[in-house]
Image: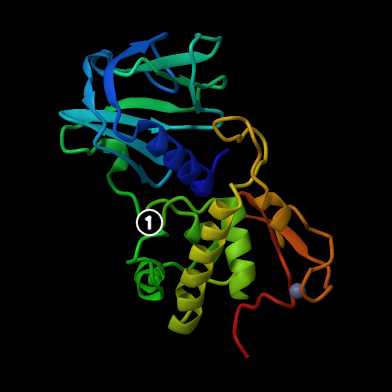
Amino acid sequence: MPELPEVEIVRSGLERLLSGAAVAGIDLHRRDVRRPMPASLRTLSGPVRAVRRRAKYLCIDLDGGGILCHLGMTGSWRVAVDVRPHDHATVRLADGRRLVYNDPRRFGVLDRLRPDGGHPDLDGLGHEPLSDDFTGAALAACFADRRGPVKPALMDQGLVVGVGNIYAAESLFRAGIDPRTPAGSLRRPRLDRLAHCVREVLAEAIAAGGSSISDFRHAGGEEGWFQHAFRVYGRGGEPCLTCGTVLRGMALGGRATVWCPRCQRQRTR
Ligand SMILES: [Zn+2]
């Protein structure tokens, strides 16, 4: 499943494709993806004003509304001349190009944005980790009442968006925090460090072209290579790359979790 870095890479690719472009019309090739696609999508047209990302949603802003897209597990966009199986929608551009959304497993979302660019799916989302207001202070406010472990809290979309299992594990390793640590027990210096490490890991993953696990590929089909930089994710039972200690693994909040019992601590000494 694409996580935030992969969605950001798709966003920047779409932004390049759609810069200065105008939408002539939208064709729907079937009725639904994860849920029905509104027929009102067909009536959208006009200049592309912006291509935004909020959490793992893509927003293509047009006058009077726009397109909301979530890639789900297997969604992708491509510039195409032909329609293939699993193509769900075609955005026809005024210059003759056709931008096609394909989603074999159909866990994605295609919907219409309100004229103000909003959508119910975007309400109630937490902090955007690549924004300037994502700080240790913001994490302290989010985690204040949380007695449960920090890793599921970091992955709670109502607190922080777009940090999935891979990037939560890697950020906690880099910050030296045991993923089982009660979120509300973390003090400011460690939360400052954690906010910094989340941003750093995500930025490095974007620069590396994302992580190619399961179905993620760029428009164009090439793989990202950040998966080769994982320090803990998927490495339970292997030696820590920093200290050589055998990495531990357990399920935490229902998700496989790996950490180094030496490099990552619940309390600082
Ligand atoms: Zn270690």
Q: Residue at x 19, y 32 (%)?
A: 114
Which residue type does callout 1 highlight?
Glu
Q: Position of residue 188 (x, y in %)?
A: 43, 82
* Horizontal side, residue 255 vs residue 32: left or right: right
Relative to 221, does residue 152 appear above or below in the rendering? Answer: below
20 to 147, vertically: above or below: above
- Residue 253 visible in image: no
The reply to whether the residue tagged 1 has its Cβ within 8 angstroms of ligand 1 is no
Callout 1: few (<14), some (14-19), or many (20+) C-alpha neighbours within 10 Å?
A: many
Q: Nearer the viewer, residue 53 or 172?
A: 53
Residue 129 or residue 43, whichever sits in front:
43
Residue identified by numbered label 1:
128
Q: Quadrant of the N terminus?
A: top right
Ligand 1: give its quadrant: bottom right
Q: From the top left corner, tell me how far across and down residue 33 is, in percent.
A: 44, 19
Front residue of 18 and 175: 18
Q: Secondary structure under badge 1?
A: loop
Q: How is the image coloured?
A: rainbow
Q: Is residue 137 above or below residue 229?
A: below
Q: Position of residue 264 (x, y in %)?
A: 67, 75
Q: Quadrant of residue 97?
A: top left
> Residue at horizontal 53%, vertical 43%?
6
List x then y, in percent, for residue 15: 38, 38
How many marks can you see? 1
Q: Residue at x 39, y 21 (%)?
A: 35
Q: Residue at x 42, y 52 (%)?
A: 161
Q: Which residue extends farthest bottom? A: 269
Position of the C terminus, as image quadrant, is bottom right
The reply, left or right, for residue 58 in relation to residue 105 is left
Residue 198 seen in this snapshot? yes
In the displayed structure image, the side of residue 263 where residue 170 appears, left or right: left
